[in-house]
Amino acid sequence: MSAGLDPRLLARAREVVADTTGFRDDAIAQDAVERVLRAELARGRVPTEVLSELQQLGSPLAYTLVRAVLVGETYFFRQPEHFRYITQEGIPSALRHGAMHLRGWSAGCATGEEAYSLAACLLACAPAGMPVEVVGTDLHEASLEAARRGTYGAWSRRESAPALHPVYELLNGRQVSILPEVRKVTRFAPANLLAPLPERFGLFDFILCRNVLTYFSPSARDAAIVHLARSLAPGGLLFLGTVEVDRAPPGLTREGPPELQAFRKPRPEERTFAQLPVAQPVATPRMTPTPRRLSAPPPALPAPPPSPPPSPARLHLQALERIEEGNVAGATAVLELLVKQAPDYLPGLLELALLRERAGARDAAFPLMRALRTRAGQLPPDALVDGPEALPARFYLASADAYLNLGALE
Ligand SMILES: C[S@@+](CC[C@H](N)C(=O)[O-])C[C@H]1O[C@@H](n2cnc3c(N)ncnc32)[C@H](O)[C@@H]1O
């Protein structure tokens, strides 16, 4: 199959695809990669020239390769059990907890059927007048253009997936068009799941990321899940594809039966002991009058030893607490202190870098990610690193690599 193709060219092309998408090597279609390379050579380019273009991650050829391997298979109300759970459990729970709006994210939305299905589901169940908003994101720009057009053929409507809520109307004999009210609350944007979704997108009550992570390497999948979880509102639900994870992602709890692959971000009042805020209440002065002493006062107690500075994990939790409250400036100040006091604490470097990235300060995020990569690279890959969640060093290395490669692509 690969006869005639320079093995270095093939290897580099696969590397470019893996670095950009997070795909495992065996999930990268060899025939698609070969097709792109052969087409390049057929245009009269020599292998060394193609190889040198592939050394730059953001080159046009790198994008052509990535587009060639992405799989965009999708249809309306795929995995209907997720929409049923949102209707029967998710939305009633959000309303009981005082939701003022319902927001959804279809992460890896392909041509948009999933995003529109989610929008139709939220619209059907939201009380009258409650704002509903759904964002669909994908790496594949042409898929997003198709999503924005919002017209679909028979392939997008499968017998296996029931039409649970009104989402489209018949356009002509074969095609359907998304209902105006569903279209109005749904928008699409390019985004790579290897990076955190920028802060301007806000937090979501429902995130669907299905049939995407199944192609990812374990470290890319872990990194993407951390980003997804960060975009969940407290009490929000993340739905993954059938076999995409075998345990609840860090910081989330499983909902419903295991095969549902639904995970919830606890609300502040539901946090477990380990997740409790670490800020200590200030000691209040005693208000009971001290009885008048008749005898000599007892000798003064020795002064208590000075309290040790808060541990990195404690400072980190304080910062997470502030992020959750929406106090970005406060969280940044705590994390800056943390990184200064404990430059080897990998979760602190990652947290501050992500916070800066989400605030649009990429120049400030890069040196932190570089420091993270250097320090994580010095540890054995499977060494568990202490933090709010104990994660292996390879997770931090992969997160830094994914971020730095991605930056080079843009
Ligand atoms: C098989 S489709 C799944 C569509 C939809 N979620 C569903 O379940 O029907 C996978 C989509 O994930 C997108 N994708 C793959 N890697 C991605 C990445 N790193 N960032 C964002 N999207 C990605 C692909 O472009 C493709 O459109």
Image (cartoon, helix red, strand yellow):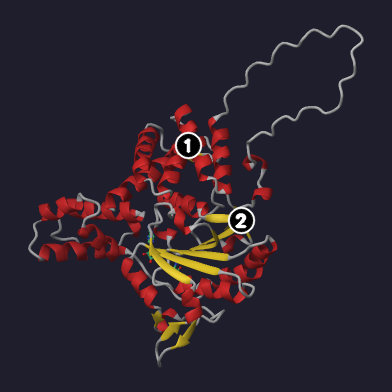
- Residue 5, placed above or below residue 275: below
Residue most extreme to the bottom: 173
**For this rendering, which residue is in front, 17 or 324?**
324
Per the image, label 2 sits on a secondary structure element best described as strand
Q: Amino acid at mark 2?
A: Arg
Rendered location of residue 14, percent (x, y)? 26, 55
Q: Secondary structure at mark 1?
A: helix
Q: Position of residue 61 (x, y in %)?
A: 20, 59
- Whole-number angstrom distance, CA of label 2 to CA of label 1: 26 Å
Residue 1 appearing in the image: no
Q: Nearer the viewer, mark 2 or mark 1?
A: 1
Image coordinates of residue 371 in percent, x first then y, are: 37, 35
Crowd around label 2: few <14 · some 14–19 · many ≥20 (10 Å): some
Ligand 1 found in image quarter: bottom left
Left or right of residue 57: residue 234: right
In the picture, the disc for residue 254 is 2
| Residue 12 picture location, percent across and down | 22, 51
The quarter holding residue 283 reads top right
Q: Is residue 220 visible?
A: yes
Report the residue at 87% width, 6% height from top. Answer: 296
* Location of mark 1 (residue): 348
